[in-house]
Image (cartoon, helix red, strand yellow):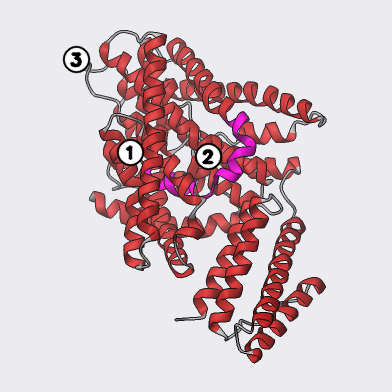
């Protein structure tokens, strides 16, 4: 079986897995890893070995970009302090703790143990984004978990580069030099990401060609990543920053039809890439076990110890941080939020990409000792966290009782739609006073909007779409502006904003040309 056939098999398998995941209410990435493991043990399935560029260049940029589209600066502002503490402090603590455990239990050289720690220090934004949407977490908590998973990827990868420099050189890197490299890589990534976002924004504001818009959106993450890497700064940071900036400008960059098309295209691309990469993680583990030290099975105990270390360090950071934030706000101490945040720390695509990119030799041309074992332990920990934490996070959220109830989401949506309808009626009053549209058209649309408002107030279904195109488009623009105001004021959350904006886009598109 050739590589192309394996990929096609994974996509077909992922379609069935995704349907099963929805019915079983479990995260698709976790189920895909399990499916990959099961397929790997079937007779006739070839050994799978991933090329470094397959994950780091082909798969990683669009997945990071898509995850960043679920987060905007408005959501990031209220949580930037705890996110910064987790992104910097927790990543460094996790890398150091894993490095110590790996040195003691796995027999790795200190430099390679620290490489392993840097590789595993970040959580997975793809799995975290999927879990946040499925579990209906509170908006602030969801933003915190998503922002941490996005930006700690950048931090850990910068730390990984510092660790690799020490391992390849066969020595150590001073603290001052390490801090300097960190600032250069991260700061350069932020700058490149902002410049790419600015350039892409200028292009998208000046075109309404759906094909060109789609092409620009698809190449944006690759452009940010490649340019940053070519300039020897963090490509991951560049992609994340560009994604978050552009996410906040989506409604100003394109029209409704193009937004719907981009949404459909990116959903398809992300589904295919997730299917391949999470399935390949499961497929690769048996190959690594057979090829290396896995025959002794000591790797299993080492991987379990490292996974437990990551969980313990995360809890030791999250619980005190949660208590400090609660005390500052005068809120009573609770285990619920820190327990969920601590458990939402599955590893995934980026650690795999980093481990695969570890050089084969040192700077002197000798084989890099411990590389294969680092790759085996990395893959094993990724599989363990995706399976164990992925399957149990949902029950933990339900047990904690912090998930937003369905009636809260419906109430928030009703509040937004009511305000939008009132804004539309106010606009119709202005149009009528100025005699800017035929009185018959104004009367028909007023009746539709009034009926819609009454239906919302009485909790009944809203009537069908109006047929008066231009005036209805003007009303949609007014409703969209009111929706954005409600979001920016904090009256409604990001999920309600995106859902209602998509509904407006669908309605506008249905009006035709």
Q: Nearer the viewer, residue 369 or 229?
A: 229
Callout 3 secondary element: loop
Main SS, magenta region, reads: helix
Kindly identify the residue that appears in the image at 76 percent across and 60 percent down. Answer: 411
Quick check: can you spot residue 49?
no
Question: Is residue 494 shown above or below 360?
Answer: below
* Real-space Cα separation, disc 3 to disc 1, in angstroms: 25 Å
Residue at the limit of the structure toward the front, as seen here: 434
Q: Quadrant of the C terminus?
A: bottom left
Q: Is residue 226 magenta?
A: no
Among the 4 quarters of the image, the one containing residue 500? bottom right
| Whole-percent x, y for residue 306 in the image | 50, 22
Q: Which residues are magenta?
A: 61-83
Left or right position of 61 against 246: left
Q: Nearer the viewer, residue 7 or 442?
A: 442
Q: Which residue is mark 3?
A: 366
């Amino acid at each position: 079986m050739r590589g192309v056939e394996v990929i096609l098999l994974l996509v077909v398998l992922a379609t069935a897995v995704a349907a099963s995941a929805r019915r079983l209410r479990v995260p698709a990435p976790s189920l895909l890893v399990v499916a990959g493991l099961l397929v790997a043990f079937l007779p006739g399935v070839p050994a799978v070995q991933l090329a470094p560029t397959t994950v780091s260049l082909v798969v990683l940029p669009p997945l990071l970009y898509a995850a960043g589209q679920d987060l905007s600066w408005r959501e990031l502002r209220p949580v930037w302090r705890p996110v910064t503490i987790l992104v910097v402090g927790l990543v460094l603590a996790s890398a150091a703790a894993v490095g110590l455990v790996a040195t003691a239990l796995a027999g790795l050289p200190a430099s390679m143990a620290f490489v392993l720690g840097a590789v595993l220090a970040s959580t997975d934004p793809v799995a975290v984004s999927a879990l946040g949407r499925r579990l209906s977490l509170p908006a602030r908590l969801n933003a915190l978990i998503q922002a941490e998973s996005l930006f700690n990827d950048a931090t850990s990868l910068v730390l990984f580069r510092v660790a690799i420099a020490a391992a390849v050189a066969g020595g150590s890197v001073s603290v001052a030099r390490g801090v300097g490299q960190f600032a250069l890589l991260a700061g350069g990534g932020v700058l490149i990401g902002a410049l790419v976002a600015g350039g892409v924004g200028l292009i998208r504001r000046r075109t309404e060609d759906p094909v060109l818009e789609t092409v620009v959106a698809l190449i944006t993450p690759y452009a940010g990543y490649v340019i940053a890497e070519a300039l020897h700064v963090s490509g991951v940071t560049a992609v994340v920053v560009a994604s978050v900036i552009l996410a906040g400008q989506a409604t100003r960059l394109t029209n409704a039809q193009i937004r719907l098309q981009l949404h459909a295209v990116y959903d398809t691309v992300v589904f295919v890439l997730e299917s391949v990469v999470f399935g390949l993680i499961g497929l690769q583990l048996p190959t690594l076990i057979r090829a290396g030290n896995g025959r002794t099975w000591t790797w299993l105990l080492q991987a379990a110890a490292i996974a437990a270390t990551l969980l313990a360090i995360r809890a030791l950071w999250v619980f005190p941080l949660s208590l400090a934030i609660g005390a500052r706000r005068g809120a009573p101490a609770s285990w619920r939020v820190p327990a969920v945040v601590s458990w939402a720390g599955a590893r995934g695509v980026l650690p795999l990409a980093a481990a695969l990119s570890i050089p084969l030799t040192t700077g002197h041309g000798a084989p890099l000792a411990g590389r294969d074992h680092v790759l085996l332990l990395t893959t094993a920990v990724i599989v363990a966290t995706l399976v164990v934490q992925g399957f149990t996070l949902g029950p933990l959220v339900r047990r904690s009782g912090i998930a937003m109830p369905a009636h809260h989401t419906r109430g928030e949506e009703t509040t937004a739609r009511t305000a939008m309808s009132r804004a539309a009626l106010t606009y119709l009053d202005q149009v009528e006073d100025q005699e800017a549209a035929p009185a018959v058209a104004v009367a028909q649309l007023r009746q539709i909007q009034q009926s819609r408002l009454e239906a919302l107030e009485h909790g009944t279904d809203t009537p069908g779409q109006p047929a008066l195109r231009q005036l209805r488009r003007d009303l949609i623009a007014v409703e969209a502006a009111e929706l954005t105001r409600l979001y920016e004021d904090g009256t409604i959350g990001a999920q309600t904003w995106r859902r209602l904006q998509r509904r407006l886009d669908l309605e506008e598109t249905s009006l035709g040309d």
